Amino acid sequence: MKYILVLLGWCLPLVLRAAQPLEPLQIAEHFVAKTGWSEMKSYLSGEAAGQARRESLGQQIPATLERRCQLLQQGLATAVVTVELHDSVSRNDIYLHFRRDSTAAAAPWKLAAVRSLSMTQLGPPMLKLLSEMPPAEVATYNQKHPDADHAFMLGNIQLWIGADANINQHFARNQEAFQRAAQFIQERHFFTSAPDSAVLEEKAANANEELQALLHPLYITRVSRRYLGCASCLEFVIGGVTDNTVGLFYQPDAQQVPTMSPDRIIVIKPLGNGWYLFKTT
């Protein structure tokens, strides 16, 4: 009897641990692993279930890419996990959006959608063209495009199609300059709370030469308040095509930061001191 009790004492914690439903970060790690995942279908819903009928996302990603998962946000009903994919020459990010189904006791958290910044196909060939441009052509290009010269376009495109870590590093190197730009915008009262004047206010702000002189070294194409649906957020847009946008925004009040969703704001990452990285779809 004594040996049975000892055996139960050793096995019971393992059984209980195995019976615990997986949390979003654990699901993400299984889903992007290089090997398959036999329990995958129990933790997928919606479009994610339709996209991974036979293979997990990890099996569809090239095996040469390493994967690093990080829990970005987890609330009562939703969660977001970021996945950095990288090898010796490249780095990219995808975002896994989860929903909690309180009626599914065995697996309440389910992966609902996988997102990344879309419509970046033109970026790499544009970057290659600019990078290989001879000095004489660079001079001609700068004469024709004084507002978006060669150096600006190189830096801007690298941020647009690059990894989140690149934007993070860019902000860390230039945080004081970003803060000066935000302060300048606030002091000049470019933006009001009137929704019917948002387009005109944005146009006036981006036509201001002093502001452009502050934004140009930061590789920011424009400032806005229209992308995030947050009237008090000051958006510094790097670039994008149609609704697929990447940039930074300033919102010192954490309670006013908008929420992420797979339908609009696919990621918001805090950078510190009221600054955030964002991407939309």
Image (cartoon, grey):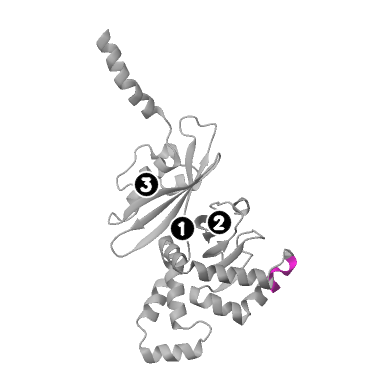
Disc ID at residue 258: none
The verdict on residue 200 being magenta is yes
Inspect this view and state whether residue 120 appears. Answer: no
Location of mark 3 (residue): 56
First in sequence: mark 2 vs mark 1:
1
State if disc 3 and disc 1 touch (CB < 8 Å).
no
State if disc 2 and disc 3 touch (CB < 8 Å).
no
Location of mark 2 (residue): 265
Q: Amino acid at mark 1?
A: Ser
Crowd around label 3: few <14 · some 14–19 · many ≥20 (10 Å): many
Write down the quadrant of residue 275 in the picture.
bottom right
Extreme residue in the left direction: 3
Q: Which residues are magenta?
A: 196-201
What's the magenta bit mostly, secondary-structure-wise?
Answer: helix
The verdict on residue 29 being magenta is no
Q: For marks 1 and 3, give the CA distance.
A: 17 Å
Crowd around label 1: few <14 · some 14–19 · many ≥20 (10 Å): some
Vertical arrangement, residue 115 with respect to residue 54, above or below? below
- Of badges 3 and 2, the one in the foreground is 2
| Position in image of residue 58 (x %, y %) | 35, 49
SS label for mark 2: strand
Extreme residue in the top direction: 1
Crowd around label 2: few <14 · some 14–19 · many ≥20 (10 Å): many
Location of mark 1 (residue): 116
Inspect this view and state whether residue 161 appears. Answer: yes
Q: Quadrant of the N terminus?
A: top left
83 or 58, nearer to the observer: 83
State if disc 1 and disc 2 touch (CB < 8 Å).
no
Q: Amino acid at mark 2?
A: Ile
First in sequence: mark 1 vs mark 3:
3
Taking the image as shown, residue 108 lies to the left or right of residue 55, namely: right
